[in-house]
Image (cartoon, rainbow, N blue to C red):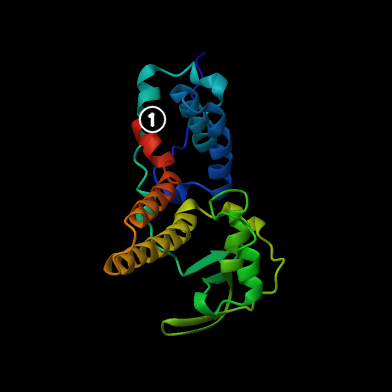
Amino acid sequence: MKQTKTLTVPTQWSDVSLQSYIRLQEELKNHIGDEIAQTHCTLYHLCGLEPDSIKDISVQSYARLKAKLSLFETPETLPLQNFIHIGGVEYGFEPNLSQMSYGAYADISQWDTIQIDNNWAKIMSILYRPVVKKKGDLWEIEPYKGGGDWKPFLELSMDVHWGVWFFFVHLQMDLLKDTLKSLTEMETNPNIKRILERSGKVIQQSWNWPEEISKG
C-alpha cells in the first residue's frame, strides 16, 4: 500500500528558524555547483523531506515543491522589528546605537565579519534585551551585562534576523554613498569609486541563497 507523506513547505522567511537556515547554509557549501544536491538539501532542511524519500515522489510533486520554495520574499525588503517576544518576555532593539555601552560594542566587534552564521545569535542577544520601560515612540532596555543566553535566538524566525542584518547593510551602504559623494566633490583618485563599488558587491553576495533557490 502506497504511503502518503504530508510536508510543510515554507514560503516566507517567518516560516524558517535561524537554526534551520544556518544548518542549510553549512550543508549547501558542500555541494557548490551541484544544483540537484543543493535542492535536495533545501527540501530536507526546510521541508523535512528525507533524501531517501525524494526518489519516491512524482516529477510533478518535485516540481511543485521547487516552485513553492521560489516564493520566498526578497529578504532586503524585510523591516527591522524594534520589539520581539521570547518566552513571553518582550525584547527591544538597542534604541540608540551611538550610545551603546562599550561592553556591548566590544563583544560585537570581536568577530571579524558580521554575517548570519554561528555567531549571529550571540550578536542578536546583545542587540535585543528585555524592555524595562516604554513611553510613546521611546523605550528602554536592560543594561548590557554580557554573557546573556543567546540560544533562544536560534529559534527566532528569519524575518526578524534579516530585518536586523539588512538594517546594518543599509546603514553601511548609505555610509559608502556619502563617502563616495564627499570624495567625488573633492576630486579624489577615481580608484576610490571602484573600491567602494567592490565593497558593495561583497555585501550583495552574502544574500545570494534566495536568488539561487529561485533559479532552481
Which one is nearer the viewer's eye here, 133 or 128? 128
At a point 33% along the width and 63% down the height, the residue shown is 188
Looking at the image, the residue that sits furthest to the bottom is: 135
**Which image quadrant is residue 149 in?**
bottom right
Q: Amino acid at mark 1?
A: Lys
Relative vertical location of residue 22 with respect to residue 76 in this rendering, above or below: above
The image shows residue 170 at horizontal and vertical percentages of 39, 61
Q: Secondary structure at mark 1?
A: helix
Relative vertical location of residue 169 with respect to residue 106 in this rendering, above or below: above
Residue at the disc numbered 1: 66
Looking at the image, the residue that sits furthest to the top is: 1
Query: Tag 1: Cα neighbours inside 10 Å, few (<14), some, or many (≥20)?
Result: some
- Residue 29 in sight: yes
Which one is nearer the viewer's eye here, 79 or 62? 79
Query: Which quarter of the rendered picture does the C terminus lie within?
Result: top left
- Residue 5 in sight: no
Which one is nearer the viewer's eye here, 148 or 180? 180
How many callouts does the rendering have? 1
Q: In the displayed structure, does residue 38 sit left or right of residue 66?
A: right
Looking at the image, the residue that sits furthest to the right is: 147
The image shows residue 68 at horizontal and vertical percentages of 36, 35
At a point 56% along the width and 68% down the height, the residue shown is 128
Relative vertical location of residue 51 with respect to residue 160 in this rendering, above or below: above
**Which image quadrant is residue 58 in?**
top left
At a point 44% along the width and 25% down the height, the residue shown is 35
The image shows residue 57 at horizontal and vertical percentages of 45, 19
Which one is nearer the viewer's eye here, 66 or 74? 74
At a point 35% along the width and 35% down the height, the residue shown is 214
The image shows residue 90 at horizontal and vertical percentages of 55, 71
